[in-house]
Image: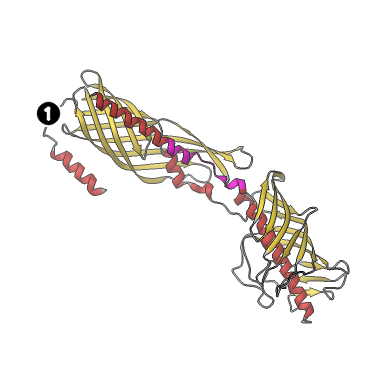
Amino acid sequence: MKKTIFIFLLLASSGLYARAQELKHTKGISFNVGVSSTLGLYYQDHYQHYSSSDPYSLSGIYEPTYEISSTEYPVFSLSGEYIVNKWLGVGVDMTYSTLSVEKLSGVSRMNIGEISVKGIYLMPSVRGYWVNKERFKLYSGLYTGAMVMFAKELENSSPKLNFSIEVLPIGMRFSIAGNGKFYGVVENLVGSRMLGCRVGLGMGF
Amino acid sequence: MKKTIFLFFAILGLSGCAKYFSDSEWSGTYDYGENAGRSYMLTVANNVIVDNLKQMEIALFINANSSGTSGRFSSTGDVWTAGSVWTVIEEDTYLSGLKIVKEAEDSTWTLSRKGKYPFGYSYRYNYYDYYSGTRPSNYFDTEYEMEIRMLPDHSDYKPADHYPWRVKLTTFSRTEDKGYSSSLYTGANHLDYKGGTLGGWDQCHGVLFMEVYKDKKIIDKARLQLEGSQGSGSYIRNL
């Protein structure tokens, strides 16, 4: 994986000055809001204390037995990007994702606790452009980075550090005003942050 | 360009499907609760009662072989004589303090004990090698009383080491941590233990009831119908 990323970055740097001068607004910053967070899956992987049980003690039988009802919130990201050339771009995302988990007793179905889960991601990216016009761009990409997850509960609040990876199968950036100076973004993301899409507004310079 | 836009939205749509499948994993119900208490009740039926019956049979063996009480029991007389009381005095056992009382001139005894009792550990017993295994740690206060009756043995092949028994669990209460306690009983029913080899009985038929309390308030009820071989039986909760 490290080798792949290195090759991508090498390609990016080699074409750094190639055709950048022909493109406008090669730098951009955008604010994005996404849906369908995958934070719940991460939480499930790393805080599975509810699945443990001890069939020989009553607390082991009844207390770990609960269902979870989760409420997801939008995934917020601040994205920076730099278009290296007509085919290649690099960027970095800072993302904040949150999830609220309600624990329901497996016996009475009553609420027996709440867990607040938060995830912060820092993910550099590389992207290739299928279409790279001044007013319209179509691209695919790959994000890799790290995420820190906090699950706040009475007995378990230690942060977890995870590797995160995400594929951007397809994304679209289109001009709103100023021939691409102000633009909108619609992206499809599959990976560590979400299995869904996000929209955003950005400014190029 | 139209094709490109079409492709864009097609992929966007597929991602929605991906999320649908991931949702089915995440919001799933953990069904462990549906069987809550089953293993617990089986522990009482297959371990606690069985271990006590084995003590009874050890007492019978020692009594029959005129070997005194072997330092394992204190006794007030022949184990078959009405009014006799045999008490487990050996320290290195979780059944220390168990009383075997012969109430009348018949084939019934009452076994009772009050004290710490571990769950989840299976001990190897035989008449000569009483204790084996790691000493358990999850002791909780447990008080029980059971009326046991030796049944006539009609089997063609008589197991070498065990009698058939009918057990009425009249009292069983266990006080555990975090405010939990349990009460088990056979009520008007009973449990029959038959067959088996040196290791134990291989047949247990009957009905066992359980009530579970949290902070002295009842939170669950269950019924376990034992249907023969160890571990088999139908379990119903929330009666």
Q: Is residue B3 visible?
A: yes
Residue occupying the point 20% across, 42% down: A8
Residue occupying the point 38% across, 42% down: A148
Q: Position of residue B37 (x, y in %)?
A: 65, 51
The one of B7 and B138 positioned closer to us in this rendering: B7
Callout 1 secondary element: helix
The magenta segment is: B20-34
Q: Quadrant of the N terminus of chain B?
A: top left
Q: Is residue B117 visible?
A: no
- Asked if B60 appears above or below A17 in the picture, the reply is below
For this view, does B226 lie left or right of residue A172? right
- Asked if B165 appears above or below A14 in the picture, the reply is below
Q: Residues within 10 Å of mark 1 (few under 14, many from 20)?
A: few
Find disc 1 in the rendering and name its residue: A21
For this view, does B16 lie left or right of residue B175? left
| Magenta portion: prevailing SS class | helix
- Is B28 inside the magenta-drawn segment? yes
Q: Position of residue B210 (x, y in %)?
A: 71, 50
Q: Position of residue A63 (x, y in %)?
A: 60, 46
- Asked if B123 appears above or below B14 in the picture, the reply is below
For this view, does A95 lie left or right of residue A4? right
> Which kind of residue does numbered mark 1 sit on?
Gln
Q: Quadrant of the C terminus of chain B?
A: top right
**Quarter of image, res A193:** top left
Colouring convention used in this rendered image of the protein: secondary structure
Residue occupying the point 66% across, 58% down: B43
